[in-house]
Amino acid sequence: MSEPERLNDFIRETVAADIAAGRDPASIVTRFPPEPNGYLHIGHAKAICLDFGIAAENGGRCNLRMDDTNPAKEDTEYVDSIIADVRWLGFEPAGIFYASDYFDRMYECAETLIRKGLAYVCDLSPEEWKEYLGTLNTPGKDSPGRARSVEENLDLFHRMRDGEFEDGAKVLRARIDMASPNINMRDPVIYRIRRIDHFRHGGKWCVYPMYDFAHPLEDAFEGVVYSLCTLEFEIHRPLYDWVLRALEFPDPPRQIEFSRLNLTNTVMSKRKLLQLVKEHYVSGWDDPRMPTICGLRRRGVPAAAIRRFCRMIGVTKFDGVTDMALLEHCIREELNASAPRFMGVQNPLKVTIVNYPAGGVAPLEARNNPEDPAAGVRQLEFGPELWIEKSDFMAEPVKGYFRLAPDKEVRLRYGYYIRCVDFVRDASGEVTELKCTYDPESRGGTSPDGRKVKGTIHWLNAATAVPATLRLYDRLFTAAQPGADGTDFLTQLNPDSMTVANGFVEPAAAGLDAGSVVQFERLGYYAKDADSTAEHPVFNRTVTLKDSWSKKNS
Protein backbone atom coordinates (compact mmCIF):
# COMPACT_ATOMS: atom_id res chain seq x y z
CA MET A 1 0.00 0.00 0.00
CA SER A 2 1.55 3.28 -1.08
CA GLU A 3 1.56 6.11 1.41
CA PRO A 4 -0.46 9.31 0.80
CA GLU A 5 0.91 12.31 -1.01
CA ARG A 6 2.65 15.01 0.99
CA LEU A 7 0.25 16.74 3.34
CA ASN A 8 -0.27 20.41 3.96
CA ASP A 9 -0.89 21.86 7.41
CA PHE A 10 -0.20 25.03 9.37
CA ILE A 11 3.31 23.93 10.36
CA ARG A 12 4.27 23.01 6.82
CA GLU A 13 2.81 26.33 5.66
CA THR A 14 5.06 28.09 8.17
CA VAL A 15 8.09 26.22 6.89
CA ALA A 16 7.16 26.98 3.28
CA ALA A 17 6.82 30.68 4.10
CA ASP A 18 10.26 30.72 5.73
CA ILE A 19 11.78 29.06 2.69
CA ALA A 20 10.06 31.55 0.41
CA ALA A 21 11.57 34.31 2.57
CA GLY A 22 15.06 32.96 1.98
CA ARG A 23 15.75 30.12 4.42
CA ASP A 24 17.80 27.32 2.91
CA PRO A 25 15.67 24.15 3.12
CA ALA A 26 18.77 22.05 3.76
CA SER A 27 19.47 24.12 6.88
CA ILE A 28 16.24 23.00 8.55
CA VAL A 29 16.88 21.04 11.74
CA THR A 30 14.17 19.45 13.86
CA ARG A 31 14.37 17.09 16.81
CA PHE A 32 12.33 14.42 18.56
CA PRO A 33 13.12 14.86 22.30
CA PRO A 34 11.52 12.14 24.46
CA GLU A 35 12.30 11.79 28.14
CA PRO A 36 13.63 8.24 28.68
CA ASN A 37 11.26 7.51 31.56
CA GLY A 38 8.98 5.06 29.76
CA TYR A 39 8.26 3.38 26.45
CA LEU A 40 7.04 5.33 23.43
CA HIS A 41 3.37 5.07 22.51
CA ILE A 42 1.37 5.89 19.41
CA GLY A 43 0.99 9.50 20.55
CA HIS A 44 4.75 9.81 20.24
CA ALA A 45 4.49 8.26 16.78
CA LYS A 46 2.53 11.31 15.63
CA ALA A 47 5.34 13.58 16.85
CA ILE A 48 8.01 11.33 15.33
CA CYS A 49 6.32 11.36 11.92
CA LEU A 50 5.98 15.15 12.08
CA ASP A 51 9.52 15.90 13.30
CA PHE A 52 11.24 13.54 10.88
CA GLY A 53 8.76 14.29 8.10
CA ILE A 54 9.34 18.07 8.13
CA ALA A 55 13.10 17.52 7.94
CA ALA A 56 12.95 14.87 5.22
CA GLU A 57 10.52 16.80 3.02
CA ASN A 58 12.95 19.72 2.88
CA GLY A 59 16.27 17.90 2.74
CA GLY A 60 17.08 18.89 6.33
CA ARG A 61 17.85 16.68 9.31
CA CYS A 62 16.13 15.50 12.46
CA ASN A 63 17.91 14.57 15.68
CA LEU A 64 16.80 12.10 18.32
CA ARG A 65 17.52 13.64 21.70
CA MET A 66 17.02 12.04 25.10
CA ASP A 67 15.73 14.68 27.50
CA ASP A 68 17.42 13.03 30.47
CA THR A 69 17.36 15.87 33.02
CA ASN A 70 15.38 14.01 35.71
CA PRO A 71 17.54 11.10 36.95
CA ALA A 72 14.87 9.87 39.37
CA LYS A 73 12.80 8.32 36.59
CA GLU A 74 15.16 7.64 33.69
CA ASP A 75 16.98 4.49 32.64
CA THR A 76 19.03 2.91 29.86
CA GLU A 77 16.21 0.41 29.26
CA TYR A 78 14.00 3.23 28.06
CA VAL A 79 16.77 4.77 25.93
CA ASP A 80 17.32 1.49 24.10
CA SER A 81 13.60 1.01 23.52
CA ILE A 82 13.18 4.55 22.17
CA ILE A 83 16.01 4.15 19.66
CA ALA A 84 14.63 0.77 18.54
CA ASP A 85 11.09 2.12 18.16
CA VAL A 86 12.12 5.17 16.12
CA ARG A 87 14.09 2.98 13.73
CA TRP A 88 11.32 0.40 13.50
CA LEU A 89 8.92 3.16 12.49
CA GLY A 90 11.21 3.80 9.53
CA PHE A 91 13.25 6.81 10.62
CA GLU A 92 17.00 7.18 11.06
CA PRO A 93 18.11 10.09 13.26
CA ALA A 94 20.74 12.48 11.90
CA GLY A 95 22.29 12.17 15.36
CA ILE A 96 21.46 10.75 18.78
CA PHE A 97 22.03 13.26 21.57
CA TYR A 98 21.52 13.46 25.32
CA ALA A 99 20.54 16.55 27.28
CA SER A 100 22.85 15.37 30.06
CA ASP A 101 25.86 15.78 27.78
CA TYR A 102 25.14 19.53 27.87
CA PHE A 103 25.07 19.82 31.68
CA ASP A 104 28.38 21.71 31.81
CA ARG A 105 27.20 24.19 29.20
CA MET A 106 23.82 24.56 30.88
CA TYR A 107 25.51 25.30 34.19
CA GLU A 108 27.60 27.97 32.50
CA CYS A 109 24.45 29.47 31.00
CA ALA A 110 22.90 29.63 34.46
CA GLU A 111 26.01 31.43 35.75
CA THR A 112 25.69 33.89 32.87
CA LEU A 113 22.11 34.67 33.90
CA ILE A 114 23.27 35.27 37.47
CA ARG A 115 26.01 37.63 36.29
CA LYS A 116 23.45 39.53 34.21
CA GLY A 117 21.18 39.89 37.22
CA LEU A 118 18.63 37.55 35.62
CA ALA A 119 18.81 34.66 38.10
CA TYR A 120 19.08 34.32 41.86
CA VAL A 121 19.23 31.64 44.56
CA CYS A 122 16.00 31.29 46.52
CA ASP A 123 15.69 29.69 49.99
CA LEU A 124 11.88 29.39 50.06
CA SER A 125 10.38 25.93 50.39
CA PRO A 126 7.73 24.87 47.85
CA GLU A 127 5.05 25.51 50.47
CA GLU A 128 6.40 28.98 51.23
CA TRP A 129 6.69 29.77 47.52
CA LYS A 130 2.96 29.20 47.08
CA GLU A 131 2.39 32.20 49.35
CA TYR A 132 4.71 34.36 47.21
CA LEU A 133 3.51 33.17 43.80
CA GLY A 134 0.16 34.91 43.76
CA THR A 135 -2.87 33.80 41.74
CA LEU A 136 -4.25 34.32 38.27
CA ASN A 137 -5.94 37.47 39.60
CA THR A 138 -3.28 38.77 41.97
CA PRO A 139 0.43 39.41 41.35
CA GLY A 140 3.11 37.58 43.27
CA LYS A 141 5.60 39.15 45.64
CA ASP A 142 9.37 39.09 45.55
CA SER A 143 11.29 36.28 47.19
CA PRO A 144 13.83 37.54 49.75
CA GLY A 145 16.50 35.99 47.53
CA ARG A 146 15.76 38.53 44.80
CA ALA A 147 17.69 41.15 46.78
CA ARG A 148 20.94 39.17 46.84
CA SER A 149 23.98 40.47 45.02
CA VAL A 150 25.45 38.79 41.96
CA GLU A 151 28.47 37.71 44.00
CA GLU A 152 26.35 36.12 46.71
CA ASN A 153 24.17 34.31 44.18
CA LEU A 154 27.23 32.94 42.35
CA ASP A 155 28.71 31.75 45.62
CA LEU A 156 25.50 30.03 46.69
CA PHE A 157 25.02 28.46 43.26
CA HIS A 158 28.56 27.04 43.33
CA ARG A 159 27.93 25.67 46.81
CA MET A 160 24.71 24.07 45.55
CA ARG A 161 26.75 22.34 42.85
CA ASP A 162 29.36 21.25 45.40
CA GLY A 163 26.76 19.46 47.51
CA GLU A 164 26.80 21.78 50.51
CA PHE A 165 23.02 21.98 50.83
CA GLU A 166 20.30 19.37 51.26
CA ASP A 167 17.75 18.55 48.58
CA GLY A 168 15.11 21.26 48.43
CA ALA A 169 17.08 23.68 50.62
CA LYS A 170 17.73 26.08 47.74
CA VAL A 171 16.80 26.53 44.08
CA LEU A 172 17.99 28.83 41.34
CA ARG A 173 15.21 30.99 39.91
CA ALA A 174 15.06 33.04 36.75
CA ARG A 175 14.43 36.70 37.62
CA ILE A 176 11.60 37.70 35.30
CA ASP A 177 8.32 39.29 36.45
CA MET A 178 6.38 38.46 39.61
CA ALA A 179 3.39 40.37 38.23
CA SER A 180 3.23 38.52 34.91
CA PRO A 181 -0.27 37.29 33.95
CA ASN A 182 1.48 34.06 32.87
CA ILE A 183 2.35 32.36 36.15
CA ASN A 184 5.09 30.38 34.39
CA MET A 185 6.96 33.69 34.06
CA ARG A 186 6.87 34.48 37.77
CA ASP A 187 10.49 33.70 38.61
CA PRO A 188 10.39 30.00 37.67
CA VAL A 189 12.88 27.49 39.06
CA ILE A 190 15.65 26.69 36.56
CA TYR A 191 17.92 24.56 38.78
CA ARG A 192 17.22 22.33 41.77
CA ILE A 193 19.26 20.11 44.10
CA ARG A 194 18.74 16.35 43.58
CA ARG A 195 21.14 13.88 45.18
CA ILE A 196 20.39 11.10 42.71
CA ASP A 197 22.96 9.42 40.50
CA HIS A 198 22.38 9.88 36.79
CA PHE A 199 22.18 6.70 34.71
CA ARG A 200 24.86 8.04 32.34
CA HIS A 201 26.98 10.30 34.57
CA GLY A 202 26.74 8.65 37.97
CA GLY A 203 27.23 11.05 40.87
CA LYS A 204 28.96 13.84 38.97
CA TRP A 205 26.05 16.22 39.52
CA CYS A 206 23.78 16.95 42.46
CA VAL A 207 22.10 19.92 40.76
CA TYR A 208 19.95 19.43 37.68
CA PRO A 209 18.33 21.90 35.28
CA MET A 210 14.56 22.09 35.02
CA TYR A 211 13.01 21.07 31.71
CA ASP A 212 11.82 24.58 30.84
CA PHE A 213 15.39 25.86 31.14
CA ALA A 214 17.13 22.88 29.56
CA HIS A 215 14.84 22.49 26.55
CA PRO A 216 15.51 25.79 24.76
CA LEU A 217 19.23 25.44 25.48
CA GLU A 218 19.37 21.94 23.99
CA ASP A 219 17.58 23.18 20.88
CA ALA A 220 19.94 26.13 20.56
CA PHE A 221 23.08 24.01 21.08
CA GLU A 222 21.97 21.68 18.27
CA GLY A 223 20.95 24.41 15.84
CA VAL A 224 17.31 23.36 15.86
CA VAL A 225 15.17 25.59 13.65
CA TYR A 226 11.68 24.32 14.51
CA SER A 227 10.99 23.05 18.01
CA LEU A 228 7.68 21.24 17.54
CA CYS A 229 5.75 20.60 20.76
CA THR A 230 2.24 19.61 21.78
CA LEU A 231 -0.27 22.21 22.89
CA GLU A 232 0.34 21.91 26.63
CA PHE A 233 3.69 23.64 26.04
CA GLU A 234 2.09 26.72 24.47
CA ILE A 235 1.87 28.49 27.81
CA HIS A 236 5.57 27.70 28.37
CA ARG A 237 6.66 29.31 25.09
CA PRO A 238 7.22 32.79 26.60
CA LEU A 239 9.76 31.25 29.01
CA TYR A 240 11.36 29.29 26.15
CA ASP A 241 11.80 32.53 24.22
CA TRP A 242 12.95 34.46 27.31
CA VAL A 243 15.80 32.02 27.98
CA LEU A 244 17.06 32.29 24.40
CA ARG A 245 16.82 36.11 24.40
CA ALA A 246 18.45 36.47 27.80
CA LEU A 247 21.41 34.37 26.67
CA GLU A 248 21.55 36.18 23.32
CA PHE A 249 21.51 33.16 21.02
CA PRO A 250 21.65 34.19 17.36
CA ASP A 251 18.92 32.79 15.07
CA PRO A 252 17.13 31.13 18.02
CA PRO A 253 14.87 28.10 17.53
CA ARG A 254 11.18 28.68 17.01
CA GLN A 255 8.70 26.72 19.13
CA ILE A 256 5.47 25.73 17.36
CA GLU A 257 2.70 23.79 19.10
CA PHE A 258 0.25 21.25 17.68
CA SER A 259 -2.47 19.06 19.14
CA ARG A 260 -1.49 15.79 20.72
CA LEU A 261 -3.02 12.47 19.73
CA ASN A 262 -5.83 11.16 21.92
CA LEU A 263 -7.19 7.74 20.99
CA THR A 264 -10.43 6.16 22.16
CA ASN A 265 -10.52 3.22 24.58
CA THR A 266 -6.96 3.65 25.78
CA VAL A 267 -4.75 5.96 27.84
CA MET A 268 -1.66 7.87 26.72
CA SER A 269 -0.36 9.08 30.07
CA LYS A 270 3.04 7.55 30.83
CA ARG A 271 2.09 7.57 34.50
CA LYS A 272 -1.04 5.53 33.84
CA LEU A 273 0.73 3.19 31.44
CA LEU A 274 3.42 2.61 34.05
CA GLN A 275 0.71 1.87 36.61
CA LEU A 276 -0.85 -0.71 34.30
CA VAL A 277 2.53 -2.41 33.97
CA LYS A 278 3.65 -2.23 37.61
CA GLU A 279 0.30 -3.38 39.00
CA HIS A 280 0.14 -6.23 36.46
CA TYR A 281 -3.04 -5.23 34.70
CA VAL A 282 -1.07 -6.02 31.54
CA SER A 283 1.86 -8.37 31.00
CA GLY A 284 4.38 -5.60 30.30
CA TRP A 285 5.14 -2.56 28.18
CA ASP A 286 4.90 -4.75 25.07
CA ASP A 287 1.53 -6.26 25.97
CA PRO A 288 -0.37 -6.25 22.64
CA ARG A 289 -3.24 -4.35 24.27
CA MET A 290 -0.99 -1.42 25.13
CA PRO A 291 -0.77 1.65 22.86
CA THR A 292 3.03 1.48 23.09
CA ILE A 293 5.02 1.14 19.88
CA CYS A 294 6.49 -2.16 21.12
CA GLY A 295 3.01 -3.39 22.06
CA LEU A 296 1.64 -2.51 18.64
CA ARG A 297 4.64 -4.19 17.00
CA ARG A 298 4.09 -7.37 19.03
CA ARG A 299 0.43 -7.29 18.08
CA GLY A 300 1.44 -7.33 14.42
CA VAL A 301 0.72 -3.73 13.46
CA PRO A 302 2.94 -2.73 10.51
CA ALA A 303 5.04 0.42 10.82
CA ALA A 304 3.60 1.60 7.50
CA ALA A 305 0.08 1.45 8.96
CA ILE A 306 1.11 3.68 11.87
CA ARG A 307 2.75 6.18 9.50
CA ARG A 308 -0.38 6.24 7.34
CA PHE A 309 -2.58 6.71 10.37
CA CYS A 310 -0.49 9.66 11.55
CA ARG A 311 -0.74 11.30 8.17
CA MET A 312 -4.50 10.72 7.98
CA ILE A 313 -5.22 12.38 11.34
CA GLY A 314 -3.18 15.39 10.28
CA VAL A 315 -1.70 18.24 12.31
CA THR A 316 -3.99 20.82 13.89
CA LYS A 317 -4.17 23.31 16.76
CA PHE A 318 -7.31 21.72 18.19
CA ASP A 319 -7.40 18.86 20.67
CA GLY A 320 -9.74 16.02 19.87
CA VAL A 321 -10.17 12.29 20.25
CA THR A 322 -9.53 9.94 17.33
CA ASP A 323 -11.55 6.76 17.07
CA MET A 324 -9.51 3.57 17.40
CA ALA A 325 -11.47 2.33 14.37
CA LEU A 326 -9.44 4.67 12.13
CA LEU A 327 -6.18 3.09 13.27
CA GLU A 328 -7.68 -0.35 12.69
CA HIS A 329 -8.77 0.72 9.22
CA CYS A 330 -5.19 1.69 8.37
CA ILE A 331 -3.94 -1.64 9.73
CA ARG A 332 -6.44 -3.64 7.67
CA GLU A 333 -5.63 -1.72 4.52
CA GLU A 334 -1.92 -2.40 4.92
CA LEU A 335 -2.25 -6.06 5.90
CA ASN A 336 -4.85 -6.82 3.24
CA ALA A 337 -2.22 -6.05 0.63
CA SER A 338 0.72 -7.72 2.33
CA ALA A 339 -0.35 -10.52 4.66
CA PRO A 340 -0.26 -14.12 3.36
CA ARG A 341 -3.47 -16.12 3.77
CA PHE A 342 -3.76 -19.29 5.79
CA MET A 343 -6.56 -21.16 7.46
CA GLY A 344 -6.90 -21.54 11.19
CA VAL A 345 -9.72 -22.82 13.37
CA GLN A 346 -10.40 -20.98 16.58
CA ASN A 347 -13.05 -23.17 18.25
CA PRO A 348 -12.72 -26.57 16.59
CA LEU A 349 -15.49 -28.99 15.79
CA LYS A 350 -14.60 -32.38 14.32
CA VAL A 351 -15.99 -33.41 10.93
CA THR A 352 -15.73 -37.01 9.67
CA ILE A 353 -16.11 -37.52 5.91
CA VAL A 354 -17.98 -40.82 5.80
CA ASN A 355 -17.50 -41.40 2.05
CA TYR A 356 -13.81 -40.48 1.93
CA PRO A 357 -12.17 -42.74 -0.71
CA ALA A 358 -9.69 -45.39 0.41
CA GLY A 359 -7.06 -44.10 -2.01
CA GLY A 360 -7.35 -40.52 -0.83
CA VAL A 361 -7.67 -37.39 -2.99
CA ALA A 362 -5.21 -35.11 -4.75
CA PRO A 363 -4.04 -31.96 -2.93
CA LEU A 364 -6.10 -28.81 -3.32
CA GLU A 365 -4.69 -25.44 -4.36
CA ALA A 366 -5.05 -22.21 -2.40
CA ARG A 367 -3.96 -18.67 -3.22
CA ASN A 368 -1.47 -17.14 -0.80
CA ASN A 369 -2.86 -13.63 -1.25
CA PRO A 370 -5.70 -12.78 -3.67
CA GLU A 371 -4.51 -9.14 -3.62
CA ASP A 372 -1.05 -10.15 -4.88
CA PRO A 373 -0.87 -12.65 -7.77
CA ALA A 374 2.92 -12.78 -7.36
CA ALA A 375 2.43 -14.36 -3.91
CA GLY A 376 1.66 -17.65 -5.66
CA VAL A 377 -0.25 -20.66 -4.40
CA ARG A 378 0.14 -23.44 -1.85
CA GLN A 379 -1.26 -26.93 -1.55
CA LEU A 380 -3.80 -28.10 1.03
CA GLU A 381 -4.45 -31.69 2.03
CA PHE A 382 -8.06 -32.85 2.21
CA GLY A 383 -8.58 -35.78 4.57
CA PRO A 384 -11.15 -38.06 6.19
CA GLU A 385 -11.21 -35.96 9.37
CA LEU A 386 -11.42 -32.18 9.38
CA TRP A 387 -11.70 -29.32 11.83
CA ILE A 388 -14.25 -26.55 11.26
CA GLU A 389 -15.50 -23.74 13.49
CA LYS A 390 -18.21 -24.65 15.98
CA SER A 391 -20.08 -21.53 14.89
CA ASP A 392 -20.27 -22.93 11.35
CA PHE A 393 -22.77 -25.60 12.40
CA MET A 394 -26.25 -25.19 13.85
CA ALA A 395 -28.34 -28.23 14.75
CA GLU A 396 -31.53 -26.17 14.53
CA PRO A 397 -30.73 -23.42 12.01
CA VAL A 398 -32.47 -20.08 12.30
CA LYS A 399 -33.81 -18.18 9.30
CA GLY A 400 -30.99 -16.71 7.22
CA TYR A 401 -28.36 -19.18 8.49
CA PHE A 402 -26.52 -20.48 5.42
CA ARG A 403 -23.75 -22.51 6.97
CA LEU A 404 -23.72 -26.18 7.87
CA ALA A 405 -26.86 -27.79 9.33
CA PRO A 406 -28.50 -31.23 9.19
CA ASP A 407 -29.01 -32.25 5.55
CA LYS A 408 -27.58 -28.90 4.41
CA GLU A 409 -24.61 -28.32 2.14
CA VAL A 410 -21.75 -25.85 2.30
CA ARG A 411 -18.63 -25.25 0.29
CA LEU A 412 -15.25 -25.80 1.88
CA ARG A 413 -12.89 -22.95 1.04
CA TYR A 414 -10.70 -24.10 -1.89
CA GLY A 415 -12.27 -27.56 -1.54
CA TYR A 416 -15.50 -29.51 -1.99
CA TYR A 417 -19.16 -29.34 -1.17
CA ILE A 418 -19.94 -31.26 2.01
CA ARG A 419 -23.35 -32.25 3.39
CA CYS A 420 -24.14 -33.01 7.04
CA VAL A 421 -25.83 -36.41 7.31
CA ASP A 422 -25.59 -36.87 11.10
CA PHE A 423 -24.07 -35.39 14.23
CA VAL A 424 -23.03 -36.57 17.69
CA ARG A 425 -23.77 -34.91 21.04
CA ASP A 426 -22.07 -35.52 24.38
CA ALA A 427 -23.82 -36.09 27.70
CA SER A 428 -24.35 -32.34 28.15
CA GLY A 429 -26.00 -32.03 24.75
CA GLU A 430 -23.08 -30.24 23.07
CA VAL A 431 -22.40 -31.21 19.48
CA THR A 432 -18.96 -32.89 19.36
CA GLU A 433 -18.76 -34.38 15.88
CA LEU A 434 -20.39 -34.11 12.48
CA LYS A 435 -20.81 -36.89 9.97
CA CYS A 436 -20.65 -35.52 6.43
CA THR A 437 -20.37 -36.64 2.86
CA TYR A 438 -18.36 -34.83 0.24
CA ASP A 439 -19.10 -34.44 -3.47
CA PRO A 440 -15.95 -35.45 -5.39
CA GLU A 441 -17.30 -33.65 -8.47
CA SER A 442 -17.38 -30.29 -6.70
CA ARG A 443 -13.62 -29.86 -6.44
CA GLY A 444 -12.69 -26.17 -6.45
CA GLY A 445 -16.20 -25.11 -5.46
CA THR A 446 -18.25 -25.86 -8.56
CA SER A 447 -20.65 -28.71 -9.32
CA PRO A 448 -21.37 -30.29 -12.75
CA ASP A 449 -25.11 -30.22 -12.12
CA GLY A 450 -24.99 -26.47 -11.52
CA ARG A 451 -26.34 -26.49 -7.99
CA LYS A 452 -25.29 -23.59 -5.78
CA VAL A 453 -24.62 -23.28 -2.08
CA LYS A 454 -24.77 -20.02 -0.17
CA GLY A 455 -22.29 -20.80 2.56
CA THR A 456 -18.50 -21.13 2.35
CA ILE A 457 -16.54 -22.12 5.45
CA HIS A 458 -12.88 -22.63 6.29
CA TRP A 459 -11.41 -25.88 7.52
CA LEU A 460 -8.26 -27.82 8.34
CA ASN A 461 -7.11 -31.37 7.81
CA ALA A 462 -7.17 -32.84 11.31
CA ALA A 463 -4.24 -35.13 10.55
CA THR A 464 -1.84 -32.29 9.74
CA ALA A 465 -3.26 -29.30 11.61
CA VAL A 466 -0.99 -27.93 14.34
CA PRO A 467 -2.45 -27.13 17.79
CA ALA A 468 -2.08 -23.39 18.47
CA THR A 469 -2.99 -20.77 21.04
CA LEU A 470 -4.87 -17.82 19.60
CA ARG A 471 -4.96 -14.70 21.76
CA LEU A 472 -7.96 -12.58 20.85
CA TYR A 473 -7.42 -8.94 21.74
CA ASP A 474 -10.00 -6.21 22.01
CA ARG A 475 -10.09 -2.66 23.39
CA LEU A 476 -8.20 -2.28 26.68
CA PHE A 477 -10.93 -0.07 28.17
CA THR A 478 -14.71 -0.10 27.87
CA ALA A 479 -14.92 3.70 28.08
CA ALA A 480 -14.06 5.80 25.04
CA GLN A 481 -12.14 8.24 27.29
CA PRO A 482 -11.09 6.32 30.39
CA GLY A 483 -11.22 8.43 33.53
CA ALA A 484 -12.38 11.55 31.70
CA ASP A 485 -15.51 11.89 33.86
CA GLY A 486 -13.55 11.60 37.09
CA THR A 487 -14.01 7.84 37.32
CA ASP A 488 -10.98 5.77 38.30
CA PHE A 489 -9.69 4.69 34.91
CA LEU A 490 -8.80 1.25 36.29
CA THR A 491 -12.48 0.50 36.94
CA GLN A 492 -13.08 0.91 33.20
CA LEU A 493 -10.68 -1.82 32.11
CA ASN A 494 -12.32 -4.20 29.66
CA PRO A 495 -12.50 -7.67 31.28
CA ASP A 496 -12.68 -9.16 27.78
CA SER A 497 -9.69 -7.27 26.38
CA MET A 498 -7.95 -10.65 25.95
CA THR A 499 -9.50 -14.07 25.57
CA VAL A 500 -7.61 -17.21 24.67
CA ALA A 501 -8.71 -19.87 22.19
CA ASN A 502 -7.06 -23.24 21.79
CA GLY A 503 -7.36 -24.05 18.12
CA PHE A 504 -5.42 -25.28 15.13
CA VAL A 505 -3.53 -23.71 12.22
CA GLU A 506 -2.00 -24.85 8.96
CA PRO A 507 1.49 -26.37 9.29
CA ALA A 508 2.93 -23.66 7.01
CA ALA A 509 1.63 -20.92 9.32
CA ALA A 510 2.96 -22.72 12.39
CA GLY A 511 6.45 -22.75 10.88
CA LEU A 512 6.69 -18.99 10.31
CA ASP A 513 9.16 -16.83 12.21
CA ALA A 514 8.01 -14.92 15.29
CA GLY A 515 6.67 -11.53 14.25
CA SER A 516 5.23 -12.80 10.96
CA VAL A 517 1.72 -11.51 10.30
CA VAL A 518 -0.89 -13.56 8.45
CA GLN A 519 -4.57 -13.50 7.70
CA PHE A 520 -6.43 -16.51 8.99
CA GLU A 521 -9.30 -16.51 6.54
CA ARG A 522 -12.64 -15.46 7.98
CA LEU A 523 -11.03 -14.88 11.40
CA GLY A 524 -8.74 -11.87 11.10
CA TYR A 525 -5.09 -10.86 11.03
CA TYR A 526 -2.70 -12.52 13.46
CA ALA A 527 0.96 -12.14 14.39
CA LYS A 528 3.07 -15.09 15.53
CA ASP A 529 4.27 -14.33 19.05
CA ALA A 530 7.72 -14.86 20.51
CA ASP A 531 6.08 -17.06 23.17
CA SER A 532 5.70 -19.74 20.49
CA THR A 533 7.60 -23.00 20.69
CA ALA A 534 8.57 -25.37 17.88
CA GLU A 535 5.68 -27.65 18.87
CA HIS A 536 3.07 -25.08 19.81
CA PRO A 537 2.72 -21.70 18.07
CA VAL A 538 1.04 -18.71 19.68
CA PHE A 539 -0.71 -16.09 17.56
CA ASN A 540 -1.90 -12.63 18.63
CA ARG A 541 -4.91 -11.23 16.85
CA THR A 542 -3.94 -7.91 15.31
CA VAL A 543 -7.39 -6.87 14.11
CA THR A 544 -10.56 -8.59 13.05
CA LEU A 545 -11.54 -8.56 9.41
CA LYS A 546 -14.45 -6.26 10.24
CA ASP A 547 -15.17 -3.87 13.10
CA SER A 548 -17.12 -6.07 15.48
CA TRP A 549 -16.64 -3.64 18.40
CA SER A 550 -18.94 -0.90 17.09
CA LYS A 551 -21.70 -3.42 16.39
CA LYS A 552 -21.33 -5.00 19.83
CA ASN A 553 -21.53 -1.64 21.59
CA SER A 554 -24.05 0.19 19.41
Image (cartoon, rainbow, N blue to C red):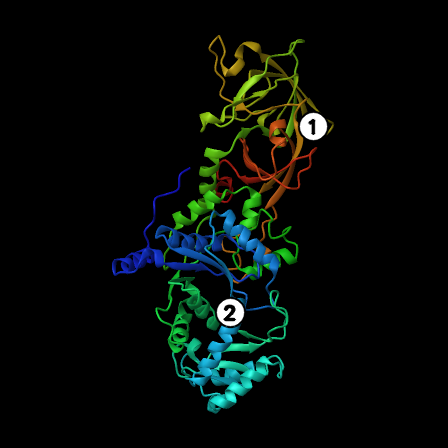
Residue at left offset 54%, top offset 83%: 157
Amino acid at pointer 1: Gly
Residue 258 pos. (x, y %): 39, 60
Q: Is residue 292 visible?
A: no
Label 1: which residue?
A: 429
Between marks 1 and 2 in the image, the one whose residue lies nearer the viewer: 2
Structural crowding at the residue carrying mark 1, measured as other residues with C-alpha within 10 Å and reported as few (<14), some (14–19) or many (≥20): few
In the rendered view, does 286 fall on the left or right side of 148?
A: right
- Front one among 296 and 191: 191
- The circle drawn on residue 62 is none
Residue at left offset 45%, top offset 33%: 337
In the orientation shown, which residue stands out farthest toward the left? 21
Q: Is residue 246 visible?
A: yes
Label 2: which residue?
A: 102
* Mark 1 element type: loop
Determine whether 294 is above or below 349 in the image: below
